Amino acid sequence: MSHPVTYIHLAPGRLPTGRLKPAPYKMVVIADAAVAPEWQAQVSAWIVKSGCRYMIAWGVDCSSWDDAVDMANIEAFDFGDIPDQHFIPTSWHADDPIEEVFGFCKYDAAHPVVELKQTVLLHIADAANEDALLQAYAAA
């Protein structure tokens, strides 16, 4: 079964707004640009609050996105216990081609207790590349 895929372009330094519907969802952060840690923390907090329940990072400093989303989720629960339905598994894939990352997202990334029926491709870059990334995701 194919789930809907949403593409969001976010230029470094700009902040996302709103919640994504339907939440919960899984996300691939496609980092095509280096970003400031403070901005990354703000975006990571938005990722957590907007309903992400599985985050996969790829690209420039992708391991820092893994850490930043983990920290944002811990902070969202005041460093206490995170309820199972709010747990966000994270992974980073520095050495994998984007096609393999998309395949992992489509076929292997699953939350332990929440069904995820939507995927978001969050593209961190100076310029958008929506068509190419959606086509690559569809082909994976």
Image (cartoon, rainbow, N blue to C red):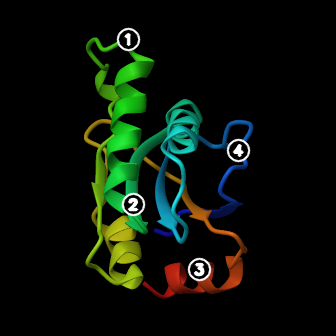
84 relative position to 46: left or right:
left
Query: In which quarter of the view is residue 86 placed?
Result: top left
| Position of residue 13 measured from the top left corner of the image (x, y, whole percent) | 68, 50
Instruction: Between label 3 and label 2, give the one nearer the viewer.
Output: 2
Which amino acid is tagged 4? Pro
Which amino acid is tagged 2? Ala
Of the numbered discs 1 and 3, the one sitting upstream in the chain is: 1
Q: Which residue occupies 53% across, 40% down?
A: 47
Residue 4 can be seen in this image: no
**Spatial separation of the CA atoms under disc 2 and disc 1:** 24 Å
| Position of residue 71 measured from the top left corner of the image (x, y, whole percent) | 35, 32
Near mark 4 (Cα within 10 A), the count class, few <14, some 14-19 or many ≥20, is some
Between 2 and 92, the one lying in front of the other is 92
Of the numbered discs 3 and 4, the one sitting upstream in the chain is: 4
| Position of residue 18 measured from the top left corner of the image (x, y, whole percent) | 73, 36
Q: Which mark is residue 78?
A: 1
The residue tagged 3 is 133
Which amino acid is tagged 1? Asp
Q: Secondary structure at mark 1?
A: loop
62 relative position to 12: left or right:
left
Q: Which residue occupies 70% across, 44% down?
A: 16
The residue tagged 2 is 57
Residue 90 can be seen in this image: yes
Query: In which quarter of the view is residue 93 placed?
Result: bottom left
**Spatial separation of the CA atoms under disc 1 and disc 3:** 36 Å
Of the numbered discs 4 and 1, the one sitting upstream in the chain is: 4
Instruction: Between label 1 and label 3, give the one nearer the viewer.
Output: 1
Q: Is residue 32 above or below residue 120?
A: below
Of the numbered discs 2 and 1, the one sitting upstream in the chain is: 2
Which amino acid is tagged 3? Leu
